[in-house]
Image: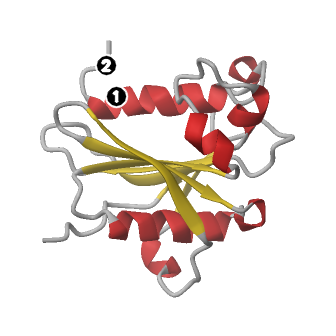
Amino acid sequence: MPRNIIDAVSILMSVAFTALIPGAAKAQTTSPTETDKCEKYRSQSVPRFKVVRKTRIGSDSALLLFVTIAPVGVDRNRLIALSCQLGIDHSVENELFVWILDNERAAKHYNPQGEGNDRATASAVVGLYGFSRRQGGPAYGQSLEWRPNRANRQVIHIDLGPPPEKAD
């Protein structure tokens, strides 16, 4: 049983990517990890996106977003720029978790636990961004997990450092 919202969302993120492709849980045992900084992407243009679903979970009210981008907007730098911008846009939050998909229908119906997702919906997930500044919880910072190639089951974890400065 998850101890806090970060554990719960971490489980959801893990399930989301192992559910993307049948057999992924067997094939994917570790994810490559990269480190980057949002400051590098402040001047880069952010791909057009649409917030399709917005919800809060838990008594601490972590914000969950499901956003769509055009499939042509799916590359590492553009996803980082989008993630960092979403972090700034929602910097008043203590916790933010964003599922980035390349299909609006999928974003409307996607279940992070994997239940009820058809293949097209599950494969529309291209990235998961999140940050937490939860007091007393594990140090989470902000990070992006993305799948650079749909034909490959590999997921890359990108540590983006501490969460954005909290807005007043």
Where in the figure is residue 145, as x and y percent of width and height?
A: 57, 47
CB atoms of marks 2 and 1 within 8 Å: yes
Residue at mark 2: 2
Q: Is residue 87 depicted above or below 157 in this figure?
A: below
Q: Quadrant of the C terminus?
A: bottom left
Q: Residue furthest bottom?
A: 43
Residue at mark 1: 7
Q: Residue furthest top?
A: 1
Judge whether residue 129 can be spotted in this image.
yes
Where in the figure is residue 50, as x and y percent of width and height?
A: 55, 61
Instruction: Give amino acid for label 2.
Output: Pro
- Apparent side of residue 3 relative to residue 83 in the rendered image (left or right): left
Q: Is residue 125 depicted above or below 114 in this figure?
A: below
- Which residue occupies 69% across, 52% down? 102
The answer to which quarter of the image holds residue 150 is top right
- Which residue occupies 53% across, 67% down? 82
- Apparent side of residue 118 relative to residue 92 in the rendered image (left or right): right
